Image: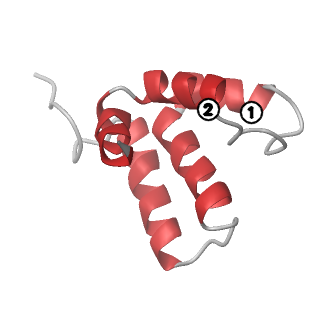
Amino acid sequence: MPCLLVVLALFVPRVVLAVVWFFTDWFVGMFDSLLLPLLGFLFLPTTLLWYSVVVNVYDGVWGTLQIVVAVITVLMDLGSPLFGKKGK
């Protein structure tokens, strides 16, 4: 089941974020206000998912792997030509 969630997170990250938000307690106490998660949901959903994984699975420790994956997720969210379709 977790592998299916990871694959879905790459294709429909906002749906996975909504499911995780409503059915788990991963986001409880992570943010002081609702503004940052809302902005993350709108603009950087894959990065927000990875941030929640680092906080909950890796206990908030940012090592080399976590930083490299964070950079990759930001590039994916911002629409880097390395990820996704290329325009005309």
Say which of 18 and 67 sits in front: 18
- Few, some or many residues within 10 Å of mark 1 (<14, 14–19, 20+): few
- Residue 10: give x, y in percent of width and height: 32, 38
Residue at position x 62%, y 48% from top?
Answer: 52
Q: Residue furthest right?
A: 32
Q: Which residue is mark 2?
A: 40
Residue toward you, 38 or 18: 18
In the displayed structure, 53 sits above or below 49; it is below
Residue drawn at x 47%, y 24% is: 14
Residue at numbered disc 1: 36
> Which x, y percent locates residue 68?
44, 67
Q: Is residue 80 left or right of residue 30?
A: left
Q: Residue furthest bottom?
A: 64
Instruction: Tell me: residue 51, above or below residue 46.
Output: below
Quarter of the picture holding the N terminus: top left
Instruction: Check disc 2: other Cα within 10 Å, few if <14, some if 14-19, many if 20+.
Output: some
Where 9 sits versus 41, above or below? below
Q: The disc labelled 2 sits on which kind of residue?
A: Gly
Residue 61, how many percent across, how many down?
66, 72
